[in-house]
Image (cartoon, rainbow, N blue to C red):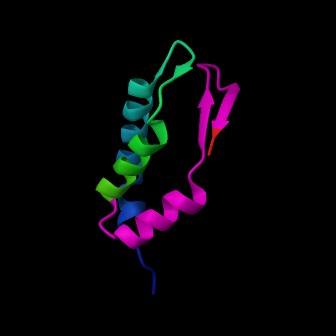
């Protein structure tokens, strides 16, 4: 049996949403407070299982800030 969970189904939309959240909290190399909360809120909006979404965010959330060429600038976790 193969199970497909909501997070997997919504992966593309979550990725686009994270990009939108990041654009509101990151500008000219400056990272505003609240970035992780914004990403957490977005993930929970797409994953109706609050327990799973909470575990995902608390255990695995790591935000990598990269420049336009993909060079790693900073990691926030």
Q: Position of residue 27 (x, y in %)?
A: 48, 16
Q: Position of residue 22 (x, y in %)?
A: 45, 31
Is 12 positioned to the left or the right of 60 in the image?
A: left
Is 72 positioned to the left or the right of 14 in the image?
A: right
Is 54 positioned to the left or the right of 68 in the image?
A: left
Which range is magenta?
47-75
Q: Position of residue 51 (x, y in %)?
A: 40, 72
For residue 4, which quarter of the picture? bottom left
Residue 44 can be seen in this image: yes
Say if 8 sits above or below 3 in the image.
Answer: above
**Residue 54 magenta-drawn?**
yes
**Residue 13 magenta-drawn?**
no
Q: Residue at x 57, y 16 (%)?
A: 29
Instruction: Name the residue nearer the viewer: 9 or 76.
Output: 76
For residue 69, which quarter of the picture? top right
Q: Position of residue 10 (x, y in %)?
A: 35, 55
Please, which residue is most extreme toward the bottom here? Answer: 1
Q: Residue at x 58, y 19 (%)?
A: 68
Say if 52 sits above or below 40 in the image.
Answer: below
Q: Which quadrant is the N terminus positioned in?
A: bottom left
Say if 40 sits above or below 51 in the image.
Answer: above
Q: Residue at x 35, y 66 (%)?
A: 6
Residue 5 can be seen in this image: no
């Amino acid at each position: 049996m193969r199970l497909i969970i909501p997070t997997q189904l919504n992966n593309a939309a979550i990725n686009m949403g994270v990009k939108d959240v990041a654009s509101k909290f990151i500008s000219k190399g400056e990272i505003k407070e609240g970035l992780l909360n914004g990403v957490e809120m977005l993930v929970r909006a797409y994953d109706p299982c609050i327990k799973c979404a909470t575990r995902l965010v608390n255990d695995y959330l790591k935000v990598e800030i990269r420049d336009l060429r993909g060079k790693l600038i900073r990691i926030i976790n």
